[in-house]
Image (cartoon, rainbow, N blue to C red):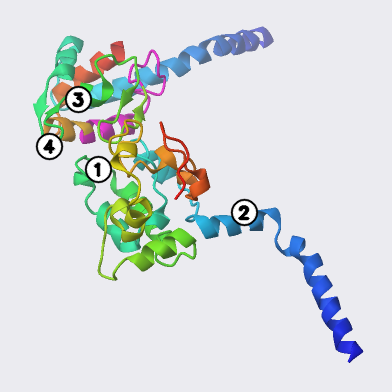
Amino acid sequence: MKNLLISFLTISVYISPTYSVTADENTVNTLMKSYQLKGVKSADAQRGEQFWSKTFTGNEPFTERSCKSCHTANLKTKGEHVRTGKIIKPLAPSVNQASLSDVKKVNKWFKRNCKWTTGKECSAQVKADILAFIKQQ
Amino acid sequence: MKYPVTVSLIILITGVIMVPVVFSDGDRREYRQRSVGVAPVHSPKYQEECSSCHMAYPPGLLPARSWKKIMAGLEKHFGDNAEIDVESLKSISEFLVTNSADDSDYRRSRKIMRSLNSNDTPIRITETPYIKYKHDEIPDTLIKFNKKVNSLANCNACHHKAEQGLYSEDGVHIPGYGRWDD
């Protein structure tokens, strides 16, 4: 019985670091489930990547806008707020563990940034595709 | 006649001895901050929600009426969308209004308030007459056309202790130029 307990504890020690990494996975899964409830069948990272580079028209002085305007084309590098110049941490989870780790934050930024960039909120399908694309980075 | 002189001397000496007791280091720091800056208040929520995009401006730089106006229009926030959830909106607004310039006894807050008419509701700190006047001699080349500054709104590009509410001239360092002396 004692041996069993010790092996159980040893296993938990080995599992716990992996578990903290998969917390990110949980965030993505929760978000994906919420998109499925809105009718999304599957997420396509490639489509997400295309959307990332798509340009939209906006008011002066930022008449051409895209995700790249602030986050750049390479998600592994830091971005810069187009108006204030404030540094934006890289979105790629491979270099920034905090990225995609908080459902509330992802929802907040999707809402704000889709509205500024495209003029309206993004559809659940677009969000699912972008999420799939960012997750791969 | 001798007696009052002794009393005055005792009072004087006691006063001198008491100075370090009454004005401890902390007091002196606070006194300095009061005389050169704005209140160094802090809110983790404000920091989190607002400073992702810009410096967390100390609330003592604008009157309460201005903060209320700004917070009522976050959907169109200086050309950006800065919507936040209702709960954050409520708590941040409360923080800004409570610590606004109105009743502050910090030097910069008092100066800003004095420079405004009672019906002025500026939504830009940089448009308050006091702040405008304080920067009117600095050429555009050092602010607007300085790539490391960009705008007068980037206080902390030159005032390195801006977020802590300190704006004295000896703390100014303009990128690519150096110290600024009036």
Q: Is residue A133 left or right of residue A90?
A: left
Using the rendered image, report if marks 4 and 2 lie on a common chain: no
| Gap in angstroms between the C-alphas marked 4 and 1 | 21 Å
The reply to whether discs 3 and 2 touch (Cβ–Cβ < 8 Å) is: no
In-front residue for pair A36/B8: B8
Amino acid bearing label 1: Glu
Label 1 marks a residue whose chain is B
Q: Residues within 10 Å of mark 3 (few under 14, many from 20)?
A: many
Residue B5: give x, y in percent of width and height: 86, 84
SS assignment at label 2: helix
Q: Quadrant of residue B134?
A: bottom left
| Gap in angstroms between the C-alphas marked 2 and 1 | 37 Å
Residue A21: give x, y in percent of width and height: 44, 16
Question: Of all residues shown, which one is farthest toward the left?
Answer: A57
Going 85% across and 78% down the picture, which residue do you hit? B9
Between tags 3 and 2, which lies in front?
2
Residue B115: give x, y in percent of width and height: 34, 65
Q: Which residue is mark 1?
A: B83
Between tags 3 and 4, which lies in front?
4
| Gap in angstroms between the C-alphas marked 3 and 2 | 53 Å
Residue B148: give x, y in percent of width and height: 35, 31
Q: Quadrant of residue A101?
A: top left
Q: Residues within 10 Å of mark 4 (few under 14, many from 20)?
A: few
Label 4 marks a residue whose chain is A
**Residue A72 to residue B17: above or below:** above
Q: Is A108 one of the magenta-colored residues?
A: yes
In-front residue for pair B31/A99: B31
Q: Which residues are magenta?
A: A90-112
Instruction: Please give the label number shown on residue A35.
Output: 3
